[in-house]
Amino acid sequence: MKKTLLLLLAGLIYFVGGFAYTPTPFNFHNYSVAHKRATLPSKYDSRELGIILPSRDQGQTNTCWAYTACDVAQTLFHKNGSESGYLSPAVYTNCAKELGFKDICIDSGGNEGITTAMNNMLKAPVYLETTGEIVKGDDDCPDYSVEDIHAYISETSDLPKRDKYAIKEAIMKYGSVFSSMFYEDEYFNSQTNFYEFINEEEEEEGEEEKDISNHAISIVGWDDEKEAWLVRNTWGPTWGDDGYFWVSYKDTEVDKKCVSFNSFISTKEIDNVYTYSKTGSTGDFGFVQANKPTSILIAYDIEKGESIEYISTYIVHPNTKVQIVVQDSEDNTVLYEGKEETIKYSGMYSHKLTTPVKSNGETLLVQICYTANYSYAVPIERVQENYNEGITISDNQWLYNGGWMPIGKDTNYPFNIVAYIYTKKDNSTAIDETESENKISVLTAGQINPEIWKTAIRINIFDISGRNFGSLKPNDTMPNLSNGYYILVVDHKDGTFTTERFNKF
């Protein structure tokens, strides 16, 4: 009876909030890998490295997942000598709906998949000058610009479940890992700050293991003598041991879905992202037999003067071999061919082109070949009820199955391939300040003049070096910009454009 009540309680927390970690709709952690064993210390504590800021308090909001993602990213930055300070959980909770996630706010749940999608879309993590606690009732997406983004998280790993070696290795490399657990006060010993929950509910043979996690935390160390993980919580420094506690190795949930944030890219290296998958990977797809290559092809209309610097995709299965090729769409000329690489863990993989491919305004084709010990090797964005919006893209994605088969909207396979093209704007194509002036002033008292939207469909913001700070559409407000000179490029309904230069001070 008690076991049944626990599972019912977990389900209740999933739907009404509680600690507000809601599991991802697709579990990429159900695998195991072999390790080339090395000696790991019996104790480890990332706090001793001076790379972790004091614990923050999520308060009465359902935002443990967003705080945890910020904690893990901040620790990665500091581990690599890049001190960013506190990062904004409100950007994850309040801005995710802009990408197509449903009902995401400070009073709903979330998970690492949402934060990864925000990172992939170059929307986060955002730096704050304060400690950045979320305010109850404030569901607005914060105003921020690329200047507030410390760096872009470029690679993550969905570590194999219950793999203590993989988790420990990741903590030593990156400072911490994102994790989730089932939390109930009755399993916490406040005298020793020790926690252990064992789910004794047996799964039927062949039945998919239930995910009853309800709380997100980060693991920052371990102690083999205690047989426990050192965990950073999101309930402030007055809870537990200055915001930390120990979770037993025997706990059945804490090591099932650990995610490491592995590397980051400077915002100076990337200006734009092209993708058809805004909410990230929620499934896998394919036809070929295991250990046979599966190829996908995606068409992108890259702006003239931009160069492809990085190409990223999701790796669904461990030890997948991946190779990336860029082609001209007119004659299929190979413009770039990367070396085949083997990726050990599932997760986001990022490939830096050794020779960037510059666009002349034509359509470019990106081909990615996956070879895995599984038949379904292609990462896809599939619509999940109460999670993300419908697919709206078509005529630009194909999967090879004896011939190039179209996928996407209005096909038999309505989903998007998960791939991201990151470009850098050529400084030589920076906006010419001598171009024609607007007849109607774009700015009035520092805001977009409503008159301009009578003829305009979009306004792009650049600094004087040509760096793009984002695009505005009607009813959008100006983002927060640092002091300096900027150029607004206004695209009009008749196909023309005009510019205006302004100084923010």
Image (spheres, rainbow, N blue to C red):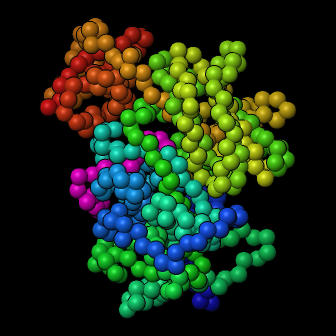
Which residues are drawn in magenta?
120-140
Q: Main secondary structure of the magenta part?
A: loop
Image: 347 above or below 71: above
At horizontal 53% and vertical 82% (from top left) the residue drawn is: 224
Image: 195 above or below 40: below
Image: 283 above or below 397: below
Say left or right for 258 vs 203.
Answer: left
At horizontal 63% and vertical 72% (from top left) the residue drawn is: 162
Say left or right for 171 vs 38.
Answer: left
Percent position (x, y) of residue 234? 37, 69
Nearer to us in this view, 464 or 397: 464
Verify whether residue 138 appears in magenta. Answer: yes
Query: Quadrant of the rendered structure where residue 301 is?
Result: top right
Quadrant for the N terminus in the image: bottom right
Evaluate whether residue 378 shows in this view: no
Percent position (x, y) of residue 128? 27, 51
Query: Quadrant of the rendered structure where residue 288 is?
Result: top right
At horizontal 39% and vertical 10% (from top left) the residue drawn is: 496
Image: 29 above or below 389: below
Verify whether residue 26 appears in magenta. Answer: no
